[in-house]
Amino acid sequence: MRILDNATAPEAVRALLARDVFAGTGEHAQQAAAIVQDVRERGDAAVLEYTRRFDCADFRADQMRVAPAAIKAARNAVPPAFLNAVAVAVGNLTDFHRRQVRQDWFAPRPGGGWVGQRFTPVQAVGAYVPGGQAVLPSTLLHVCVPAQVAGVERLAVCCPPRADGCGEPHLLAAAAIIGIDEIYLIGGAQAIAALAYGTATVPRVDLVAGPGNPWVNHAKRLVFGVVGIDSLAGPSEILVIADDSADPRQIAADLLSQAEHSADARAILLTPSRALATAVAAEVELQLTALDSPTARQALEAVGGIVLTADLDEACALASLCAPEHLEILVPEPSRLLGRVRHAGAVFLGEHSPEPLGDYVAGPSHVLPTGGTARFASPLGVDTFVKKSSLVCYERESLANEAPAILTLARAEGLEAHARSIEARLD
């Protein structure tokens, strides 16, 4: 891994930390737009055509929706250890997200009446689960369990089919465990369009959630407004802050855990220790040889790196500048640095809290803001699937108390009908 010194190469360091999720994806945008429009116009016929082109050459229309019986049967097709692992993840996800559930609230107004807020779940959600390099039953759980806790009535899962046209057994088994029986073997931009606009086979939803490739992200951008979306999740990222007390072997393993996702996954170490930087670089090379992952090597060479900082304060400042998806803090008292980093999707504190813990069983969803969007965005959670309604219920006296302010503001804006609406109740 390249080692950069922030004292002598600050521009190179900032270039390493900066990223544009949609840089170089103009062709993807054009292709996604054509697919979305085609599915909107031709429905199932277009979905079938793209599935045959991209996923399974002899895919049939009757394979598009997985039979509920096949979903249930998948539980018997996977090892008991997998079922137990899913149970652990579901238990922790459920416990974590139940703590996010909001309660309706009400506040009285002088003179009678009240205002308040009501929280209601989105009725129908489409959960997109990527395929491609890996099938991710964990993503199904990390999207669908928070939605279930929120009270979503209908959950429809889309995932690309295998090359043989079937659903992946581990994915189907995970769905069966949490009680999902609506699964469509559709991937890419065509899946997003089908969920947003509906087809003869796929009833439309109200919100689409889940990560995907550039075609999926561009499709989500295009359908936003027709449906809601959770976020535009880009390539995976990990940023580690560590001092010379940290174990180079652990840091290297953590960096590789994200670099293996894709060739544009970002893995960066910030440290004031030159000795640690050198040791981690050597350890990464050693582990890369054993891992034999061309993807991880390409990612580390293209967008990975180690940054030498003046001290931990500077490391925290650079971490905030980066606003990473995953942040690990590997120092003796990691909680002391927590308040110094303003922006991060998920923070992992201490050597026994590696990032893959969050990918699977810790409890928070692993669908997190990427590409620096942690500056303003939050992880997927119960709030993703909840709508808020404002409530207003005034009595005559409370309306009369505030009428002068309303009349003044309305007439200052030149909106006489607004003012007369109030006066009609007070004459």
Image (cartoon, helix red, strand yellow):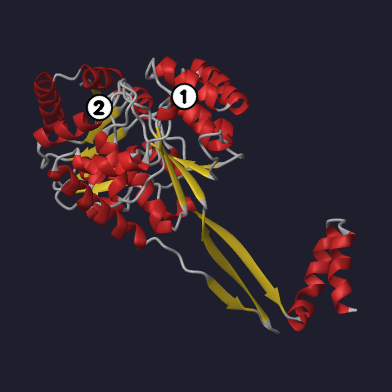
Residue 100: percent from left, percent from top: 39, 60
Q: Earlier in the sequence, mark 2 or mark 1?
A: 1
Report, in whole angstroms, how far the alpha carbon at label 2 lies from the one at label 1.
21 Å
Q: Is residue 407 left or right of residue 69?
A: right
Query: Does residue 182 show up?
Result: yes
Q: Determine whether, in the image, residue 421 is placed left or right of residue 161.
A: right
How crowded is the residue under tag 2: few (<14 C-alpha within 10 Å), some, or many (20+)? many
Q: Which residue is mark 2?
A: 259
Q: Position of residue 124 (x, y in %)?
A: 51, 48
Q: 406 or 125, which is in the foreground?
A: 125
Q: For residue 401, which quarter of the picture?
A: bottom right
Residue 242 % position (x, y)? 19, 40
Residue type beneath disc 2: Ala
> Crowdedness of circle 1 by 10 Å Cα count: few (<14), some, many (20+)?
many
Q: Residue placed at 15% from the left, 35% from the top?
A: 251
Q: Which three-letter amino acid code belongs to the residue tagged 1?
A: Trp
